[in-house]
Image (cartoon, rainbow, N blue to C red):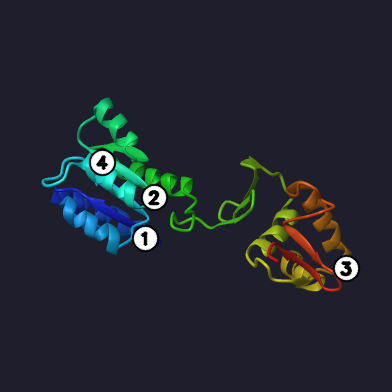
Amino acid sequence: MAKILVVDDEKAILDLIEMILKREQFSVAVASTGKAALELFETFMPDLVILDLMLPDINGHELCKEMSGRRKTPIIMLTARDDIVDKVLGLELGADDYITKPFDARELVARIRAVLRRFGNERAAGLNVVRHEELVIDLDNRTVYKNNRPVELTLKEYELLEVFARNPRRVFTREELLSKAWGYDFMGDTRAVDTCVTRLRKKIEDDSANPRHILTVYGFGYRFGGS
């Protein structure tokens, strides 16, 4: 669950954003002043900050600069002013995205998730993603990417890879992989596992003869990554 700090001097806006984000299962802290925001920035340790430009004590641009200088936490600037100068200045001072009031709740949530993904915080964004070096496995959408390019897998190849991805560094026997990926009632033999691993390696490894993702544990079976 991502932790999000919302900074705005309008209580109605704070209450609205807090309601929207809690509904999306985010953990939320709110602040109506720059001073309170900086204190929460250190104690709450947010994964992302939604920051209004117009604050009563500290200019939003200065607050953005201060937060960016302390720790690399993504910041979405929030303001009623749709001014390109404000946008550019905010981005130059460390903001990662920009949204103007009034905003659509769905757009706000989408932008939050997009920024969290860009920062590699898929789990915080509510996504079920496994990364191993250049390989990215999206378990929710059942998609695989290598060097940011989609990898086309058959259903069985994906199901076998998913077993590995959900259990990194665990060593599986061929019999275990057969039952997990093919099903307990599958009547084939364990050579089906070796064949599928060979095909899978050709698609996800740079050199299938020297694999880095699916490793052979001689005399036992296979494992996904690890040492």
Whether tag 4 and tag 2 are in contact, CB under 8 A, the answer is no
Q: What residue type is labelled 2?
A: Lys
Q: Picture coordinates of residue 94 (x, y %)? A: 34, 40
Residue 217's place in the image compared with 117, above or below, is below
Q: Picture coordinates of residue 210 (x, y %)? A: 81, 54
Whether tag 2 and tag 3 are in contact, CB under 8 A, the answer is no
Q: What element carries label 2?
A: loop
Q: Nearer the viewer, residue 131 or 163?
A: 131
Mark found first going from the N terminus, 3 or 4: 4
Mark 3 burial class by Cα count in 10 Å: few <14, some 14-19, many 20+: few
Q: Alpha-carbon distance for marks 3 and 1?
A: 44 Å
Q: What element carries label 1?
A: loop
Instruction: Please give left or right for residue 138 compared with residue 13 in the image.
Output: right
What residue is pinned by disc 3? 189
Mark 1 burial class by Cα count in 10 Å: few <14, some 14-19, many 20+: some
What residue is pinned by disc 4? 78
Q: Picture coordinates of residue 23 (x, y %)? A: 32, 58
Q: Which amino acid does label 4 sit on?
A: Leu
Q: Looking at the image, how many numbered discs can be counted on the residues?
A: 4
Q: What element carries label 3?
A: loop
State the residue at coordinates (47%, 54%). 121
User: Residue 25 bears which disc, if any?
Assistant: 1
User: Residue 72 bears which disc, if any?
Assistant: 2
Q: Which amino acid does label 3 sit on?
A: Asp
